[in-house]
Amino acid sequence: MKRFRWSLQRLLDVTVQRERALRAELVALSGRISRLREEILRRRAVLRTLLEELGRQDIERRIRNQEVFMTFSAAEERRIRRLNENLKELESQRAQKTAQLLKTRSSRKTLERLREEAYQRYVKEARRIEQKQLDESGNVAFARRLLAARAGAAR
């Protein structure tokens, strides 16, 4: 009996590979988002710490250091704003990848269901053919015995 071959197997294999690739891309994007969030939090913590230190200084030193802090703070806020923009872009990409992954997963599940249905039809047909062959063999054996009995009785 011939082996089960499904015409859409290659499509299923490609879909499974695409799903794995999308999952890996999604994990990578999530990692990048996590690192960006940590960087933003770290930069904000540095600003808070410097502001607290500035507040603890005596008035003369505070006035001298305040201008430097304000310049540094403005530059750091611009960096944080750029990081937040990058974060929003990455989150948008992650949402797109998630939608693609869900669509690909749905496609894969549909293909797997179709493959299973095709396999069940194949098994059913193979059993039907096997049963037909057994019935035929039985009929031939019965006919031979019947002919042999008639030939033996005719002698």
Image: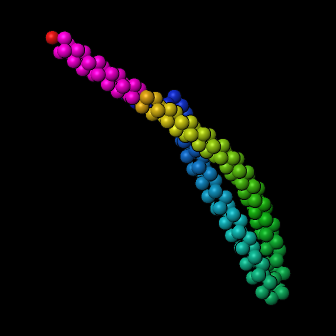
- The one nearer the camera, 39 or 126, is 126
Q: Which quadrant, please, contains the C terminus?
A: top left
The rendered magenta stretch, by its main secondary structure, is classed as helix
Residue 109 seen in this snapshot: yes
Q: Where is residue 125 in the image (x, y as percent from the top left)?
A: 46, 29
* Residue displayed at 29% across by 22% down: 142
Q: Which contiguous range is marked in magenta?
A: 129-154
Q: In the image as oriented, which residue stretches furthest toward the bottom?
A: 58
- The one nearer the camera, 122 or 129, is 129
The image quadrant that residue 21 belongs to is top right
Compared to residue 18, the image places residue 7 above or below, namely above
* Residue displayed at 54% across by 36% down: 117
Q: In the image as oriented, which residue stretches furthest toward the top?
A: 155
Q: In the image as oriented, which residue stretches furthest toward the left?
A: 155
Q: Position of residue 115 (x, y in %)?
A: 53, 36
Q: Left of 139 or right of it: where is 52?
A: right
- The one nearer the camera, 18 or 63, is 18
